[in-house]
Amino acid sequence: MTRIVVLTLLTVLSLTGRAASGSTALTVATTGPVEVSSQAVAAMVPTPAATADLSAGLPLGRVIRLVTLGDGYTAGTLTTVPRRDSWPAQLAESLAHAGWTVVFYNLAEQSATSGDLVELQLGQVESLHPDIVTVQVGVNDIVSGSTADYEANLETILTELESFLPAERILLVTTPDHTLTEWGKGFGPTESRGEAVTELNGTLREVGQEHGVEVVDIGPVNALVSHDASLLIQHDPPMPYPSAKQYAGWVEVIGPYVQDALMTLTP
């Protein structure tokens, strides 16, 4: 039986793969293991929205260690259950349903800037012995007016990660455009509010290309928020955080890149 272990900073979520009967068992542990009924499983771990086959041609049987770095977009801020609804959690779940054994650490923190990532998250990564690392950060650099340091921070992040991980197993994920929402239009320097995200993602692509690191663009999914309110958290006051539904769309985009990265692993 295949088993997934999802580790966050606060919880440990273990999800066994489908048995011959098609059933799924789930154990959630904080200070110790707690058995959860099959009825609770249906409520806590819905069928993954992502449909991409993430198992084709990959070295089955190997434990995959995934580490995700970034800000509230990666942390899953304001989702009902971040350890389940964030895009990294949904990605790990998709890999588990495809038959993988996954150890997953989400080090992302709400409100983190690229500088915060360097100071507070980056130093933890090597000791986790990751097979794949994702980085998604930038919106808080815009909000705080610190984009002048963004390129240098990206260089620091990638140089450090490449000291123990090949470039093909590092993924950069673009920052969604918060200005597509009325609430989000109020953030960032007035004179460049409509262009700041585009410029920041342009810097991300340039630095990624220099380092031979793939950049995953979730922009086309994020752009749909203009026509589908369910892609955003319904919050009072309104806030431009993605819903679990939008994150599922991101996984559809990110998943194939993860598959390509995993293909570089040896059995």
Image (spheres, rainbow, N blue to C red):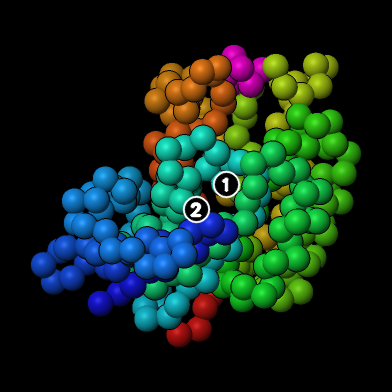
**Furthest residue toward left:** 21
Up/down of 36 relative to 43, above or below: below
- Label disc, if present, on residue 88 of the rendered structure: 2
**Furthest residue toward front:** 31
Residues in magenta?
180-185
Up/down of 163 relative to 178, above or below: below
Q: Position of residue 262 (x, y in %)?
A: 49, 70
Label 2 environment density (alpha carbons within 10 Å; few <14, some 14–19, many ≥20): many
**Quick check: 12 left or right of 119?**
left
Mark 2 and mark 1: Cα distance apart in space: 7 Å
- Check residue 98 for magenta coloring: no
Q: Position of residue 201 (x, y in %)?
A: 70, 40
Q: Tell me what residue is drawn at x 57 percent, y 59 percent.
A: 9
- Amino acid residing under circle 2: Pro
Q: Tell me what residue is drawn at x 86 percent, y 51 percent.
A: 152
Q: Position of residue 266 (x, y in %)?
A: 50, 83
- Amino acid residing under circle 1: Thr
- Check residue 184 for magenta coloring: yes
**Total numbered labels placed on residues in the image:** 2
Query: Quick check: marks 2 and 1 in contact, CB under 8 Å?
Result: yes
| Quarter holding residue 107 | bottom right
Circle 1 residue? 74
**Quick check: 36 left or right of 76?**
left
Label 1 environment density (alpha carbons within 10 Å; few <14, some 14–19, many ≥20): many
Q: Tell me what residue is drawn at x 70 percent, y 31 percent.
A: 197
Q: Is residue 189 visible to us here?
A: yes
| Quarter holding residue 14 | bottom left
**Residue situated in front as seen by the camera: 33 or 251:** 33
